[in-house]
Image (cartoon, coloured by chain):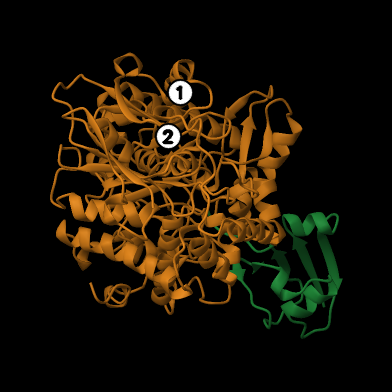
Chain colours: A green, B orange
Amino acid sequence: MRVRVELQLTLALDQPGGVFELLVEDDATVEHVLKRLGLEYDQVGLIVRNGLSLEAGDVLRDGDILMVFPPLSGG
Amino acid sequence: MGRTMRVNMQALSVTEDVNNGGHSGLGGRGLTSRIVLDEVRATCDPLGPDNKMVFAPGLLGGIALTSAGRLSVGGKSPLTGGIKEANAGGIVGNQLARLGISAIVVEDRPSGKDDWYLLKVDRNGGTLLPAGDIVGLGTHATVARLQERFGKKAGICCIGQAGEKRMRAASVAVTDILNQPNRHAARGGLGAVMGSKQLKAVVVDDSGASRRTGADDEALKREVAAFAKAIIDNPKTKNQALYGTASIVKACNSIGIFPTRNFSSGQFEHALELTGEKIYEICTGRGGEGNPTVSCMNPCVIKCGNIFPDALGKQVVSTLQYETIGLMGSNLGMTNLDAVAVLNALCNDIGLDTIEMGAALGVAAEAGLLEWGDVQQAARLLKEVAEATPVGRVLGQGAAVTGAVFGVERAPVVKGQAMPAYDPRSLKGNGVTYATSPMGADHTAGNAFGSRDKVNQLQAAGQVDLSRGLQVFAAMLDSLGLCIFARQPVLEDPTMLVNMVNYLYGWTWTKETLSDLGRKTVGFELEFNRRAGFTRADDRLPDYMYTEKLPPHNVVFDVTDEEMAQVWPDR
């Protein structure tokens, strides 16, 4: 299946463009997809799909769009 | 510990107490709240002679520690009717600490109702001087006049027209390293308390004062350097330097907590025009005075501030921040940062809390006083606050009074104080903090944003414990004078903080002492509010948030009163 990953803020600075279309296995999790981009789950903050925050083990669906943010604090 | 300076506005006297009034182990918010609890009758009129106003640097102020020079300002709040501590960055906290001052306590008020004063503080002590010539000026003109008189390097706390007119949304402005009144102890109307004492400004000249040295100064210096390095190495720091507090706009909007059109939605269709990335683009693209990365105090290695320029590169405001963008941007339907910057600059100059005024204008827009997204109308209304027209006076009392006067039920307030830019229906941990903090609705009292994986933001379960822990932690940081943006290394391990306290004071604190400091501080505040007549019935969000579904998740606030009572079960 195909998922789209949009890296945000400093994560996008590290990987130019910051937007990736990936072909992944059907039962791929958030953690799988991050690994494909060379990111550990601990290095990122919010991962958002369709307005909802995801966790490492959440399974993705074909056509998902993930926004991946670095760790953030409200000030 | 340092000295306590007592300023009596009736006797026009300044005296000093050398042992910090016996309040050992307290600084910043812990100290302001202790003094207010001990010395202010909780039932007093907050704008009457019996209220007191306290300025206090944190326990770690003045030691050249990064981001640790925040200044706490305390008193009884005219906005909430409860205790208040609001803190600000800028240069004055470190200056007072270097001068050896733990607290300045301002008491009573002058006999003549047109007699205005300023307090000059330097290494020889404090002096009250007449200030009639600067009354009526905004904060920028006030600071310019005082710098002509006392030198460019003087640190200044002052009020604008809103504070002079005793408006409940009035802030206390504090000068930063640009020597401008850009930082505000904004919340709870402490500017009005200062106005009620007819104290226009506090001017601090720390010439001749040097860094505070520690009981074990070599160890202290090593730990101070290590702490700065830990912050520099933290991945959050680079985001805050480049994109500022507004780095979270896109994230907050994407998860549906970004207040929009008087808290009627958690997502704004123009949010991408209001992001930290956009601030960066504008500050670097327009050139001139624009700068995406400035600090408010020295030292600070985070540098979350900015100088936001107009199209010609001239400074409009410093610093454009997340809460202001939420409340005066999306909450008012503003579609670009230039509009937010104009409103922010007006608030800074009049001496107004941007959160309270953004919420008040949102309520006013719902009442039909202005159109959503109309920056000219919003600016005109803010100018009416400065002019103290009848409408301006209503708005200047904040969102709750504005709602009451114009018949709008949907005023986003707790204990009379407006909510910051996280809708509590979709970030329920913040709903618990807003409802149960002794401060009224306040994100800095315990912000659940960023607490990933611990608790689901949309569910009630777990929010009470999350909020309690965050509130105690925030009260501890506020007592040390440490910025919440410096919290990450402390969350991971508070040992460095404990060491710095011990190396500085020669104490034998442990991690437990440190968290006790937070608990004790909140305890002083809950006790003051109890004496002022607050009950558990005050620990609620406004009714509509329990019934009106918030898009896009279509959720209501559903933490029950019984659960809420478990935040502070012993009080």
Residue B287 percent location from the top left of the image: 74, 28
The three-letter amino acid code for the residue at tag 2 is: Ala
Residue B95 percent location from the top left of the image: 48, 38
Element assignment for label 2: strand
Question: Mark 2 and 1 residues: CB-CB less than 8 Å, in contact?
Answer: yes
As rendered, which of A31 and B175 lies closer to the eye?
B175
Residue that mark 1 sits on: B143
Crowding around mark 2 (Cα neighbors within 10 Å: few <14, some 14 to 19, many 20+) is many
Does B516 sit above or below residue B53? below
| Residue B7: quarter of image | top left
- Which numbered marker is on residue B173? 2
Q: Is residue B34 left or right of residue B421?
A: left
Dot 2: chain letter: B
Element assignment for label 1: helix
The three-letter amino acid code for the residue at tag 1 is: Val
Dot 1: chain letter: B
As rendered, which of B377 and B147 lies closer to the eye?
B147
Crowding around mark 1 (Cα neighbors within 10 Å: few <14, some 14 to 19, many 20+) is many
Residue A26 percent location from the top left of the image: 80, 84
